[in-house]
Image (spheres, rainbow, N blue to C red):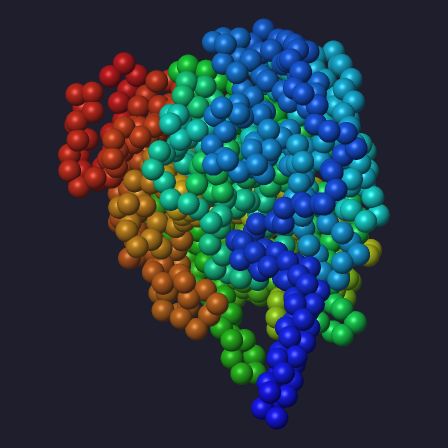
Amino acid sequence: MITRIANRRMYYTAFVAVIVVLLVILALPSLKSAIARAQLEMKPKNEVVEAASDTPAGDAAPQSPTEFEKVAETDRLELQFRSSDSAIVVKDKSNGYLWQSAVPLQDAATEGNDLWTASSQSIFHMTFTDPNLPAIETQETNSVIEQPKIKATELDNGISVHYELPRLQISFDMIFELKGNALEVTVPGQSVQEAKNNWLMAISPLPFFGAAMDHEQGYAIYPDGPGALSTFKSNHPNYLNPYRASVYGSDTISFNNYQRQQNALLPIFGLKVNENAFLGMITKGEYDANILYSPSGYLINMNRVSSELVYRREYEAVKKDGNLTKKPEKELLREDHTIRYVFFSGNEADYSHMASAYRQYLIDEKGIAPRIKKGEPIPFGLDLLMGIKEGQILFDHFIPTTTFEEGQQIMEDLTKRGVKNISANLLGWTNEGYLEYPSDYKPSSKLGGKSGLKQLSEYTKANNYQLFLQDNYIMAWKGVDGFSTRSDVVVGANHFAVTDRYSELFYLNAGKQNERFQDKVLDPLGKLAVTGINFDGIGYTDYYDYNKAYPLTREGTASKWLEMMGKSVDQFGAAAAIGGNGYTIPTSSRLFSIPMEDSGYFFTDETIPFYQMVVHGLIPYSGDAQNLFYDPRLQFLKMVEYGYMPYYQFTKKHSEDLKDTYYSDLFSSAYHNWVDQAVDQYNEMSEKLQPVWSQTMKEHRKLEKDVYEVVYEDGSRLIVNYSPREVKIDGHLVPDKNFIVVPKGG
C-alpha cells in the first residue's frame, strides 16, 4: 500500500513537473516581453524606446566605408561626403580642423556598446510610432541601424541626399550646403513620406556632429533662460536626463505656475572644442523643434549638442471607456527645417563670438534695427500697479493702488531727483484691474478715466518718456465678459477646449483676437500719446490651436500676435513684449522679464548672458523688479553685468492693500519706501554706464571666481566683483560687491 502510494506520488510529481516545464516554455515569450516592458518603465521618463527587430533593418548588408570626397568649397570651408553612409566632414581651411558627423571609432567612448557605437556613426536619429497601438509607444532608430537606401545628388555648393528606409517605409531628403563660413542642413517638408503603420515623430540631423571627449577642453552652450554653459569634465557622474527643450517654450499649454524649466528663448546651440567652435541656429521651422544637449555621462561618455525637428506630437485622447490615453497627432507637420552651423577658430572660438554671429544674423536677415539712439540716457524702468480686484462674496472690490494723477506725481518726483529718462509701464489700468482677463480695454474711471490717462500720456510725451499700457490678450477667466468658451478659445488635438482642472482659465485663439484688436482695443484709445501696448504672455507662451474656425500652428499663433504688435506700432509708434521669445525681438521697442538665471541643471556650470549679448545696444530690456529680490545688491550687480535697465515696480499706496488679491507677491511696493535707493542706484548706473548703454556687448568672460568682465564695442571694460573681498584686475582695484568701468586703453 505504501509502495503504491509512493509510486502514485512519484507519477503525480513527474506529471506536475512536465506541466510546469510546458507552462514555462509557453510563457517564455510573454516573460521576455514583460522583462522588456519593465526595462522600459525603469528608463528615465523622457527616454524613448530603442528600435528593435528580429529581421534586418534594410535589404542589404552594411556597405564597407568608402573614402570621403570633396563636394563643395568656400573661401573658409570644405565639405566632404562619404557615399557609403552619407557621413560628412566640414574642414575649416583656416587651420585644417575637421568637424565630423561620425565620431572616429577609435575615439568613440561607447564602452563596447554596439548600439551606441552605431548611434555615434549615424547621420540622423529618428523617432516613430505605430498609430494602431492603443497607446503611443515611441521608438527610436538611426541611420546605421536602418541601413537606408541612399541616393545623392550634387548641388552647386553642396549635396542633396534622399534616404529611403525599407523596414519602416519612411523616406525624406537632407540637403547639405556651404554658405560662406557656414554649413546649412535642410530637411524639406515635402520630401517626407511615411507608411500607414509607421508614423514619423521627429528627426535629429547630425546628432553627434563634432562630439567631444572628456579629455578635450571646451564646453557646450544651450538656450536655457539667458543661456547656459556646461564644460567638458574628466570626472563626472552619470546623468539620468539630458537637456531637452522645445524652442520658445513647451508645446503643451501648462497651468502650473511653478514650472522649473526656463524657456529656450532662442533657437540656438553651440560647441567649443579646444580652439574651434560652432554655433547652430535653426533658421527655418524653429517653432517645431527641440534643442538637445547630452553631457558626457548621459548614457555614454561623449558631449554632444544638436537639434530635433518635430513632425508630430502626442496628445491626450479619451478612450471609449472614458479613460485617457496618449495618442500621436494624425497630421504630419509638413514644413521645411533648416539648421545653420557657423564655424569659429582661434580667438573667435567662444560663446561671445557665437552671440555676435546670431546678432548679426538678426540684423542682416530679420531686419532688426537699433531702438536705442546713440547717446540716449539710460531709462529708469518704472512699473506702476494702478488697480486690482479683491475677491468678495457678492461683488469683487476694485482697489486703486495708483491713480493716473499719482502716476504723474511719481514721475515728476523722479525727474526732480535727477532721473533723465523714464520707461513707464501701467498694470491694471482698465476697469477690470490687473490679472482679470479679458479686460474691457477701457481706462478705469476709479483711476481717473480716459481723461486722466490722456493727461498722463501727454506729460510723458512732453518729457520724451515712454509710457506702455500692459494687457493680456491670450488668457481669459470664466465669468469675465468679452469671450465665448465655445468659439473663442484654444482647442486641443482631442477637440476639447484647453482649460485648467477647474475649467476656470482658458487661452484665446490668436486669429480671432487679432481680428478684434483694432476695433476693441486700439480705436477706443484714440490718439492717446502713449508709446504703445505692452503684450503680456506672447513672449513666453506659444501653442497649437485646433479651433475649427481658426486652426493655427505655433508659427501661425505667433504670427497673429506679431500682427497685433504691428498694429500697436502703426497707431502709437511702438510695442513691447513680456518674456522675450525670439520671434518678438523684431517688433519690440522694449523687452520685459528677460531671465537672469538658467533652470539649474546638475551639469550646468555657468549661466551666461547669451540672450543679452544678442540684444544689448539694439533693444532695451528689464528683468525682475529690484524691489522684489531677496538680495537687492546681488540683483543690482547682475543687472549691471547683464546690461539691464534699472527697474522697479511701485504703487502709490501701501502693498498691504494687496494681501487678499491675486498679486500678493508684490509684497514691498510703496514708492516712498524705495525711492531713495532707486534713485541712488539709477544715478550710479547712469554715471558709470551711460557711455556703453547704446553699444553692443562684444565679449563676456569669467576672470576668476565671482569676478566677470564685459567688453563693449568701443573697447570699454566693465568688471563686476561679486565676492566679499576687493580684487585687483590688470592694476585696477574693484571693491567688494561692486563694479568699475575701465575706458578703452585704460
Residue ID at (54%, 54%): 43
- The quarter of the picture where the N terminus appears is bottom right
Name the residue nearer the viewer: 368 or 172.
Answer: 172
In this view, 621 is above or below 34: above
Name the residue nearer the viewer: 237 or 509.
Answer: 237
46 left or right of 175 in image: left
Residue ID at (78%, 41%): 168
**Horizontal and vertical percent position of residue 19:** 68, 73
In this view, 197 is above or below 161: below
Name the residue nearer the viewer: 300 or 158.
Answer: 300
> Is any atom of residue 318 visible in this view?
yes
Instruction: Using the rendered view, name the quadrant where residue 423 is placed.
Output: top left
Residue ID at (32%, 46%): 635
> Is any atom of residue 480 visible in this view?
no
Q: How many dots with numbers?
A: 0
**Horizontal and vertical percent position of residue 329:** 75, 53
Name the residue nearer the viewer: 410 or 214.
Answer: 214
614 left or right of 65 in image: left
